[in-house]
Amino acid sequence: MKKTILNILALVLVFSGSKAFAQRLSSTDISKTGTTVAQFLKIDVSARAIAMAGAFTAVSDDIGAIFTNPAGLARSAGYQTMFTHTNWIAGTNYDFAALSLNLQEYGSFGIMVSAFDSGDMLVRTIEAPDGTGEYFSTQDFLVGVSYAKKLTNHFALGVTGKYINQKLWHMSANAFALDIGLLFTTPFWGVNLGASIKNFGSTMQLSGQDSKFAHDPDPRNEGNVYVVNSEYEMLKYRLPLSFQVGLSKNFQLAEKHNLIVGIDAVTPNDNFEAINTGIEYNWNDVLFLRGGYKSLFQKDTEEGLTAGFGFNLRLLGTTKVQVDYAYADFGRLDKIDRFTLGVHF
């Protein structure tokens, strides 16, 4: 078993190196920003992870792992739920909810649902630049099911299957994707190693009423077929695939005082590589202070400083409520405030 684990880790390290190298070759001068769809898949959902600048791949030990690294569900205790509402950029809204169940030797199961809504916008044309009186909107929807299991006390694997749907006015597109993750507590000073591949799946292609039109194939002659039902051939676009590998270390500073330090390397298929760094201070598992810096060394990024806090409120028995807040600087796009409500049973 030990040999198997070492082989898996070797494959992961080789894959991460080759993937990063290939990405550097293809994105040294071109970021490929704007070449993928379903951008809502990149919006982080856990205020805890956001406050730590997304450096959470190797930290994952609660229900927030269902988004960052599904292997972390194997380390989440009991039953957990999480709800997040985000007032996103440009007046848009994003909502997320998740439930996880740790069934011990049977592994951990999780389900998540998220929705993105742009709100109503005026339909504008060349003839009516101030609006035609009609409104349109775009909505994105995701449902995912996860499974994770500890193969040993130090090694866990997890996978998430996703169904993704996007709607743009009278058109829609669908896709299926997988997230795959691992967590390993190394024998080196208790350092945790985490790795995940997110949004590996099919392409998306819009279709529907707005891509259809009536066409006269021969407008110069009368008496022929006047109308032929036609449809624009819409392009297919990839999902925002990313590979993320991270390290974390837990420091016991004193009784009731704990510090977690995390660092992640991110390789996306639609941007330059980046480094995320974050810390979390924990007092008696009641009060949490967090901070970090996101997208280090990434060209033309608007992201940067993050911070936040959280606290646990213990209710009856082992039931507790966790409230987390995160601040994230988005440069010219202003800041984003996010709250997450979690319940642990």
Image (tube, rainbow, N blue to C red):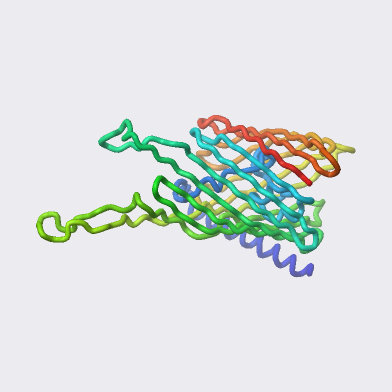
* Vertical arrangement, residue 283 with respect to residue 147, above or below: above
x and y, in percent, of residue 46 in the image = 66, 42
Residue drawn at 40 percent across, 40 percent down? 136
129 lies left or right of 220: right
Total tally of numbered discs in the picture: 0
Residue nearest the viewer, comparing 277 with 17: 277
Q: Position of residue 168 (x, y in %)?
A: 42, 46
Q: Quadrant of residue 126?
A: top left
Q: Quadrant of residue 286?
A: top right
Task: Identify the residue at horizontal 82%, vertical 35% (top origin).
Answer: 283
- x and y percent of residue 226 in the render? 17, 57
Quarter of the image where one finds residue 150: bottom right
Q: Position of residue 24 (x, y in %)?
A: 53, 53
Residue 193 relative to residue 139: left or right: right
Q: Is residue 15 above or below residue 244?
A: below
Q: Residue at x 41, y 53 (%)?
A: 206
| The N terminus, quarter of image | bottom right
Q: Is 322 or 274 nearer to us in this picture?
A: 322
Say whether residue 48 is left or right of residue 152: left
Q: Nearer the viewer, residue 98 or 68?
A: 98
- The residue at the far right in this view is 255
